[in-house]
Structure formats: C-alpha cells, structure tokens
Amino acid sequence: MTVWTLLILSLPTENASARMRAWRALKAGGAAVLRDGVYLLPGGGARRGVFEAVAADVEASGGSAHVLDLAPDTDAPFAGLFDRTADYQRLATDITACRGDLDAVAAPDLARLARKLRKAFDAVAAIDFFPGQAQAQTAALLEALDDALRARLSPGEPSARAAAIERRLVADYADRLWATRRRPWVDRLASAWLIRRFIDVRARFLWLEQPADCPADALGFDFDGAAFSHVGERVTFETLLASFGLESDPTLTRIARIVHYLDVGGLPAPEAAGLETLFAGMRAAIADDDALLEAALAAFDFLHSALKEGP
C-alpha cells in the first residue's frame, strides 16, 4: 500500500511572492491539489523533501505549514490525481510535428528542438509516479525522432555494438590512410582531429560516399564494420580514446563528453551548444570535406587549449 505525504499550508494573503514560490515548487515537484492549501505526493524521502522545503519557506514568510504522512486503506482515490496522460499527449503532438518537419527545417534547428523535447519528456517522467503506457509510447516516439534526426544529419550513422575494446599502440598506426563517411559531423570531425593530433600525425583521410567503398588498406572509422566505431555506450571518439589509452587525459575526456552529447545525447555539456552552432555554420559554408576538416582541426585545437587552461 502506498504511503502518502500531505502538505497543509496557509500564507498571509498579502505575501504574493511567497505564494508564487510555493506554487512553482509544488508544480515542479508534481504535487496534486486536494483543496486550497492542501497538497499530496506519494511518500518518499526526496518527495517528502519537496514538501519540507516549501513548508520551511512558508513559515519563514510568516505563514504556517504542516507535513504529514498517511497510509489510507486504498490508493484508488489518490493515484488518479497523478495521471500524466495529458502531458504526454501534448509532448507526443509536438514530437510528431517535429518529425513531420524533418525535410523542411535546418538539421541543427531540429536537433535543438529534439533536445528541448527530450528535456520536456524527462521533466514529465520525473513526476510520473505511476508510469504506464502513455510514458512508454511517448518515449518510443522520442527515440524514433532521434533516430530519424541522426539519419538526416549523418546518413549511415553506425549502430552500437557490444564488444571488448582492444588496446592499440600508437606506433603501429603511423602514416596511415583513414576513411570515414563524407560530409563529416561532430563525431567524425572530432575523431579525425584526435587521430591527427594524438595518434597519427601524418594521417591522410578519405571521404566515402558509402561505407562499402572503404579500401582494404584504409582504417575505417565511424561506420558499421569499421576498425573504430561505436562500442556499447561509446561513440567513435570515445572508442578511439579507449583503444589508444587516452582516457586518462582529463581535457580529452571533457571533449569526449561534448562529442557524446552532440552525437547521441546524454549528459549535457555547457560547451555543446556553441560548438554545434560553429560546426553547423562551417558545414554549411564549406563544401569540400578536406577544407572542412582543416577548419575543424583548428576549432578543436582552440577548444582543447581553452579546456586545458580553464577550470
């Protein structure tokens, strides 16, 4: 049987700012309204903490507040108060509209919208205390949007495979031909920079129309069947770091987080938005992939220097 937590509060009518703070905190925490001044959450440490924080602020603002736990005979009267179906329906509508705009809107703009939708989904899911089919169906729509966006932005994007990452020696990879898909985006550009700066300083790069065009003597990266590609949760840049023992470099690890976020999502990185805008502009302005790589090499050099010198 679910244990519930009640918040009963009363605020002076003239204290509008305290009322607004309480309302915002209760809304963000997913509290249900039983009646004016009486709020409900499923019991639990973190959720009880939402009420305790609001109660402390209310009392500091001259009001009164009480946090109580109760265990009724049945959940039926309360569980329905936390139905998030309407929220998921609105999200599903926005996701479907975004999917319909894939061919009409610039890919970087779509990527930003997709991240906004993901953030909105995560916010609803965080207060969906009794998840069901609505959450699952919306999550599936969001995954499908992410897949379609990756296909639009990076055709032939590799699928993750489960495999052990073999340690390689930099000395065995000198003066080689490296091949990846044409019109490179962040993971491929970052990987090429890592190769040129830390693995094979005389590396030459070949841009493939199709992964099947990769010559037998070339080292492929960032496509299915390549020597270096996505492994488990790692994007190609992270696979290269692990393969050549570069994961202990804290600056490269910070760059890896940015690349991972821009390529497949995950934990946000504060530098990601600016880097994405920069590369989107470079990609739009530079038609030749060799020239695009040269510009990207300089950009990553500056990023590496800034992160190395920064906090």
Image (cartoon, rainbow, N blue to C red):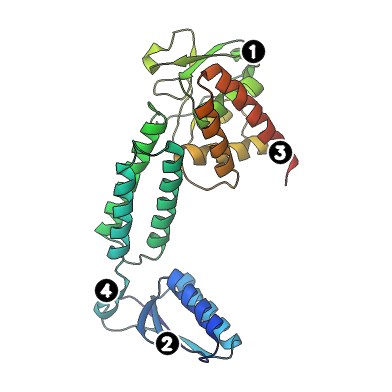
The single residue placed furthest to the right in the displayed view is 309
Residue 1 in the image: above or below residue 87: below
Q: Earlier in the sequence, mark 4 or mark 1?
A: 4
Categorize mark 2 by other alpha carbons within 10 Å: few (<14), some (14-19), many (20+): few
Q: Residues at badges 3 and 1 in contact (C-beta under 8 Å)?
A: no
Tell me the amino acid under the disc marked 3: Ala
Of the pair 4 and 280, the residue shown nearer to us: 280
Categorize mark 4 by other alpha carbons within 10 Å: few (<14), some (14-19), many (20+): few
According to the picture, the residue beneath numbered tag 1 turns out to be 202
Left or right of 95 on screen, residue 307 = right
Categorize mark 1 by other alpha carbons within 10 Å: few (<14), some (14-19), many (20+): some
Left or right of 179 on screen, residue 39 = left
Q: Earlier in the sequence, mark 2 or mark 1?
A: 2
Residue 69 in the image: above or below residue 276: below
According to the picture, the residue beneath numbered tag 4 turns out to be 80
Tell me the amino acid under the disc marked 4: Gly
Left or right of 13 on screen, residue 84 = left
Instruction: Where is residue 277? Give x, y as percent.
Output: 54, 38
Q: CA distance from mark 4 to mark 1?
A: 64 Å
According to the picture, the residue beneath numbered tag 2 turns out to be 37
Of the pair 106 and 207, the residue shown nearer to us: 106
Secondary structure of the residue carrying tag 2 is loop
Q: Earlier in the sequence, mark 3 or mark 1?
A: 1
Q: Earlier in the sequence, mark 4 or mark 2?
A: 2
According to the picture, the residue beneath numbered tag 3 turns out to be 306
Residue at 41 percent across and 57 percent down: it is 120
Residue 116 in the image: above or below residue 84: above
Instruction: Where is residue 200? Give x, y as percent.
Output: 63, 17
Q: CA distance from mark 3 to mark 4?
A: 51 Å
Q: CA distance from mark 4 to mark 2?
A: 19 Å
Q: Earlier in the sequence, mark 3 or mark 4?
A: 4
